[in-house]
Amino acid sequence: MIPDLEPAHVVGTGGAIGALLRHWVYLHVTWEDVPVATLAVNVIGSFLFGAAVFAGAGESTIQFLGIGICGSFTTFSSFSVETVQIWERGDRKLAAINAGANLLVSLAAIGFAWLLVGFA
């Protein structure tokens, strides 16, 4: 349980943690020409944020974990840029797969969190 603190401090602390975790993933999860690190952080972050919401987490926990950690851990901007870069290098099929995978697998992760936590 996160104590009631100033929201900016809670979100900022979570954001710093999420950014460091994302950096760690980018250093350790690589796959040539395929941005799997971005997919990984988006799916994991979607699952964690969904699990917190479905578990009925309080406002401070949502600010810390959801907005702070997951907000800086996940990345729509990197996903968008990487998808366009794949498209521009001529690999249209991989660009479409990347876009679809980020959307569908992230949504599936939220659904999985709902199944695990929502029915608990």
Image: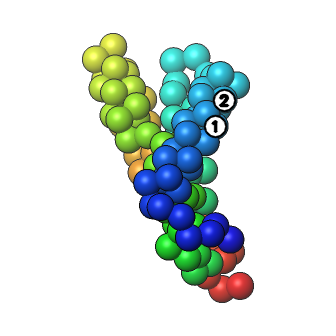
Tell me if residue 40 comes above or below residue 1 in the rendering: above
* Quarter of the figure with residue 30: top right
* Secondary structure of residue under mark 2: helix
Residue located beneath label 2 in the image: 24
Q: Which residue is at 56% across, 49% downward? A: 14
On the image, the x and y values in percent for residue 27 come to 65, 22
Residue 77 left/right relative to 33: left
Is residue 54 visible to the viewer in this orientation of the structure? no
Quadrant occupied by the N terminus: bottom right
Front residue (pair 27, 80): 27
Residue type at mark 1 is: Leu
On the image, the x and y values in percent for residue 83 come to 36, 30
In whole angstroms, how far apart are the C-alphas of marks 2 and 1?
5 Å
Q: Which residue is at 47% across, 61% downward? A: 6
Front residue (pair 110, 104): 110
Residue located beneath label 1 in the image: 21
Q: Which residue is at 53% across, 56% downward? A: 10
Front residue (pair 64, 85): 64
On the image, the x and y values in percent for residue 35 come to 51, 28
Residue type at mark 2 is: Trp
* Quarter of the figure with residue 19: top right
Quadrant occupied by the C terminus: bottom right
Tell me if residue 92 comes above or below residue 9 in the rendering: above
| Mark 2 touches mark 1? (CB < 8 Å) | yes
